[in-house]
Amino acid sequence: MSVKRGPEGNALKHQLIIKMLSPEDIKFYLGLFKDLSVTDLVELFGMAKTRKISAGEIYIDEGATIKKLALIRKGLIRAYCIKPNGDDVTLMLRWEQQFFASHDNIILNQPSRFIYEALEDTVLTEVDYNRIENVLNNNPKLSSYRNLFLLNMLAESLERMESFVLLSPEERYLQLVKDKPNIVNRVQNKYLATLLGITPVSLSRIRHRIANPPQR
Amino acid sequence: MSVKRGPEGNALKHQLIIKMLSPEDIKFYLGLFKDLSVTDLVELFGMAKTRKISAGEIYIDEGATIKKLALIRKGLIRAYCIKPNGDDVTLMLRWEQQFFASHDNIILNQPSRFIYEALEDTVLTEVDYNRIENVLNNNPKLSSYRNLFLLNMLAESLERMESFVLLSPEERYLQLVKDKPNIVNRVQNKYLATLLGITPVSLSRIRHRIANPPQR
DNA sequence: AGCGGTAATTATCTTTTGTTAATTTCTGGC
DNA sequence: GCCAGAAATTAACAAAAGATAATTACCGCT
């Protein structure tokens, strides 16, 4: 009896966990992480919860300390913060098939300075980073996946940084329209403006300039 | 004989490698990586080379493809790129005890768009990332160190990004002076200006405004 | 100490952005 | 389909930044 306990226990655990992941979930994750085994997927997402957030609702509030890591299945999330003078500034937009995390909590280990709200009705899969950290550390395949994600996030962040140094506001807007036209359509201009580091009024003028090029 | 070959070979290898790392090097690295064993350090830096670059010299040129990872022991490195119109823009500054890498090569797997030059006589320890990648992947302690570094780089990059969205050019300059006064002193203003996303002329005016606040 | 080249500052002018407020357009809810 | 509130645009003005050029300050080198 005692001999079989270990394996039996594991098998049981897996069965239970697999029940929490629907077949569609498994299929979805397998599509995203092509070279991961179902076992690894279950290990990662077994303790994941699905959450629905309706448009306008706040997902992570300022001051939060829970290390949430979420994958967006449907919808759109905006991270913003409130400047001392009161107006809010968009720092990040995330949409379908993208991960995001309260980065103050996970990266800087401090209460979140940012607020994460849903701009559309949103469905996401969330895990508590504390609970998966061990799994990530001990499973080499998952470790290298985390590494890959960090590299991707870094690349994205560096690219955005470059855009501020190398491009004018107008060029940044044109780049955004070119690279993410669907997002431009889904998000209000006032949020896009602060994301680009300018005011909504200024973005409006830029759009006007683009539509009416100065003829001579 | 054949029984002892493995261990013996390893011991020999270590001895040879340790010879390449001077006692000062070992001490230096131990100070930087407090919880790494000497064995791990040797594994990482055993194949590292020391390079001296004199002020004004280029370390990595545009179009380079070698995945260099370097630790600055002394001196200061500037990464910049040349815009289509011809003027150069500083993207990054790195100095003592900091790592840097040709990030186009390592992160994006493409020829470097940037040029890395020494602004001062510089001494650095360099490794070919291809050669240490296996070591990093297979040694859990080193893996988690790499992870930590990626997180730090990400945090830094995000902070810089935030500064572009949340602060005015003047506030960015004040922040730079406050956070890195020694770097401000070591680097020419024209390089600081483009790092802040403005022109040297504009930085000069900002400095003037700060020195002569508008009295009323 | 003096020379020459570069960096930094200043000046002038143009363009762009920020700010505030008014006006128009859009949109969701009934 | 209408109405209220929000978003986007437009307007008007102030402030800041870009561009170019001239001037001044600085620095390395002999």
Image: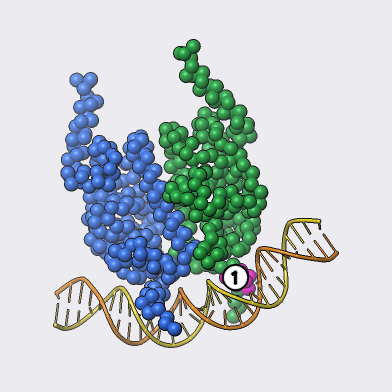
Chain colours: A blue, B green, C orange, D yellow
Residue type pointed to by label 1: Val
Q: Position of residue A137 (x, y in %)?
A: 37, 37
Q: Position of residue A162 (x, y in %)?
A: 47, 59
The residue under the point 56% across, 41% down is: B126
In what quadrant of the picture does the C terminus of chain B appear?
bottom right
The residue under the point 44% across, 35% down is: B134
Please tell me whether residue B61 is drawn above or below residue A166 in the rendered image. above
Q: Is residue B209 highlighted in magenta?
A: yes
Q: Which residues are magenta?
A: B201-212
Q: Position of residue A6 (x, y in %)?
A: 24, 25
Residue B107 visible at all: no
Q: Is residue A110 highlighted in magenta?
A: no
Residue B187 visible at all: yes
Q: Write down the residue under mark 1.
A: B201
Please tell me whether residue B122 is drawn above or below residue A75 in the rendered image. above
- Total numbered circles: 1
- Name the residue nearer the viewer: B105 or B6: B105
The residue under the point 39% across, 73% down is: A203
| Position of residue B50 in the picture relative to residue B103 (left or right) | right
Chain of the residue that carries numbered disc 1 in the rendered image: B
Crowding around mark 1 (Cα neighbors within 10 Å: few <14, some 14 to 19, many 20+) is few
Please tell me whether residue B5 is drawn above or below residue B115 in the rendered image. above
The residue under the point 38% across, 75% down is: A210
Q: Position of residue A152 (x, y in %)?
A: 39, 50
